[in-house]
Amino acid sequence: MVTYTRWVKKIQNGHRGANELRGVGYMSPKERFMSALYGGRVDRPAVGSATSVISVEVMDEVGVHFPAAHLDPYKMAELAMAAHTVLGHDNVAPLFSAIHDASGLDVSVDWGDRTMMPEVKEHPWTEVSDIKMPPDYLDREGVRVPIDAIRILKKELGNRVAIVGKVYGPWSLAYHMFGVQDFLIWTLLEPDKVRAILRGLMEIVVTFANAQVEAGADALCYGDHATGDLVSRQMYVDFLRDLHKEIRQRINAPLILHICGNTLDRMPDIAKTTMTCFHFDSSVDPAAAKAAVNGKISLMGNIDNAVTLLTGTPADVRTEVFRALDAGIEIIGPACAVPLTAPMANLLEIRRSVDAYIAGR
């Protein structure tokens, strides 16, 4: 593994990367990220993401690629460090995909390749009684590897850079284990079954989350695929709002809730969950998002990953970064996981645009 110290030397010798390693700013990246996470004072706006910022070009830059980085803790840690050492973010996030949680539950997984993210190949459960957490859940490869990677990152980075783990909530886990179509049909025809599934999966979520915290994670991305196009605001209130609040109280770290799609209509409800931050989509205007949460929760995002970062130009990225900064978004970063073929120039532009914005004030 390339250590953090070696990355510092590479950057000081002219390698593209994080200005913090040259001593710019009076806060460490971790101090900046965690303060911004709680809506506090910062020396400059924080740059970071709760979801993957890894592209093929970033993999090539580091010399570590998928799928090996999903299944080897040292490779996962080294590639995760690129968010900071290459892209200049204030945090690193070692869980790049959405299926580590499910991979420990006797489900078949395709771990993908350098151009494709992992996915589950089956949905083995059909009834609430199928929900079981194996006694060795935390020791199973897909679960153990990211926990070990967090330990490695904690040793390498210490308290300098924020480490953000990731756990998917019962709604997302239900998609993986029961299938999206069946689960969503049950929300209409068998709502009590859905509630029982969500509660049955909660213990798995909390167990994996707290194991990451114990390993050294400073915060966790809490993903739930209750996307705006599939789940109405009323469904969010009926099934998830109180559950999110309960789970937040059981996990020993700040949580960054991540939900894709246009979630503006439920942002006031999300703000009531006591989540620390909401990582929101590019389909929501940042000024409208700030108004909707009314200062009760910080916001992260919302640079468009599917279009701007993938097919746009650095100038397009800068326009969106400036709009988010004008709105007062606390942590600037991609709206969701970066497409694997996104150009490096666009990914680098996020941090560069924040620096340019500050320099122009």
Image: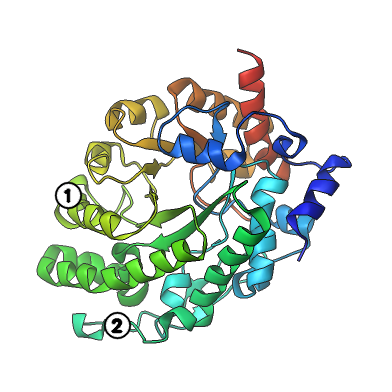
Compared to residue 361, the image places residue 3 above or below, namely: below
Residue occupying image coordinates x 17% and y 49%: 237
Residue occupying image coordinates x 56% and y 63%: 150
User: Which residue is under mark 1?
Assistant: 237
- In this rendering, position of residue 315 left or right of residue 16: left
Q: Where's the C terminus, which quadrant?
A: top right
Disc 2 residue type? Answer: Trp
Kindly tell me whether residue 66 is visible in this rendering: no
Residue occupying image coordinates x 73% and y 33%: 23
List x then y, in percent, for residue 216.
52, 60
- In this rendering, position of residue 219 left or right of residue 245: right
- In this rendering, position of residue 344 left or right of residue 13: left
List x then y, in percent, for residue 110.
54, 77
Q: Where's the N terminus, which quadrant?
A: bottom right
The disc label shown at residue 125, or none: 2
Q: CA distance from mark 1 to mark 2?
A: 25 Å
The disc label shown at residue 204, or none: none
Image quadrant in which you'd find residue 27: top right
